[in-house]
Amino acid sequence: MTIRAAQMSLDVDNNLSTSTGNVSLTNGIQSGRAEKLIFDEDRELAQLTGTPSLTRAAKGNQKELVITGQEVRALTKNKTLYVRGGVKLVQGTTTTTGDAVYYDDRKNVAYVVGNAVSTDSKSGAKIVAPASGHIEQNTALGRVLRKNATYKIPTEQFKLRTEK
């Protein structure tokens, strides 16, 4: 992974690196932008804040995917993301919004919770998750499903060591 930023520092006692100021990350066909990145070197856990945006370039039949929110937590080894606060996923003509999303990059599936709505600007189709449900978006197939069951995002695994 390549990281670029205006400033970078490393807390050797906690093995946490901090990058600030126009942070950009690149890893193969994936890239990210934020104002601040804290990276737990031992757990391979990243926290991005300051209007973070993640992009996975188009590959094969998969269209480009852009995920934005107020805060992104990423476990790079597990290839999972937790994004919260005004979450938006844009892929092709499909835009899905909600309060939070858990994304599994290995399975190409996003679980959007809290006021989850998905719209297709081409067909005009709109899917609204029930208050107690969620939206499941398969980014490999470009398929969006309304789920009536509650989805609990495993937020505990995304905590930095300095958080209680």
Image (cartoon, rainbow, N blue to C red):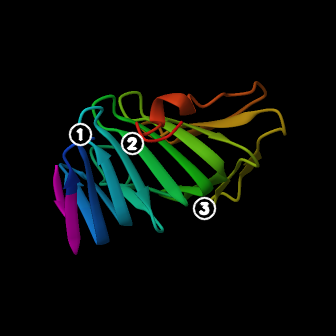
Residue underneath mark 2: 74
- Counting residues from the N terminus, which is met first, the one under dot 2 or under dot 1? 1
Residue 38 locus on image (x, y percent): 34, 53
- Counting residues from the N terminus, which is met first, the one under dot 3 or under dot 1? 1
Furthest toward the front, the residue is 13
Instruction: Tell me the amino acid under the disc marked 1.
Output: Glu
- Counting residues from the N terminus, which is met first, the one under dot 2 or under dot 3? 2
The stretch in magenta equals 1-9
The image quadrant that residue 76 belongs to is: top left
Instruction: Tell me the amino acid under the disc marked 2.
Output: Ala
Query: Which element carries disc 1, helix, strand or loop?
Result: loop
Residue 10 locus on image (x, y percent): 20, 54
Q: Nearer the viewer, mark 2 or mark 1?
A: 1
Residue underneath mark 3: 122
- Residue 31 lies, with reference to residue 129, above or below; the image says below
Query: Which element carries disc 3, helix, strand or loop?
Result: loop
Instruction: Tell me the amino acid under the disc marked 3.
Output: Lys
Q: Please give left or right for residue 89 compared with residue 18 in the image.
A: right
Residue 46 locus on image (x, y percent): 35, 46
Whole-number angstrom distance, CA of label 3 to CA of label 1: 42 Å
The one nearer the camera, 36 or 62, is 36
Residue underneath mark 1: 41
Q: Residue at x 24, y 58 (%)?
A: 25
Please say whether residue 62 is visible from this viewpoint: no
Residue 8 lies in the magenta-colored region = yes
Whole-number angstrom distance, CA of label 2 to CA of label 1: 12 Å
Furthest toward the right, the residue is 131
Figure quadrant of the C terminus: top right
The one nearer the camera, 57 or 20, is 20
* Tags 3 and 1 touching, CB below 8 Å: no
Q: Residue at x 34, y 58 (%)?
A: 37
Q: Please count the marks in the image.
A: 3
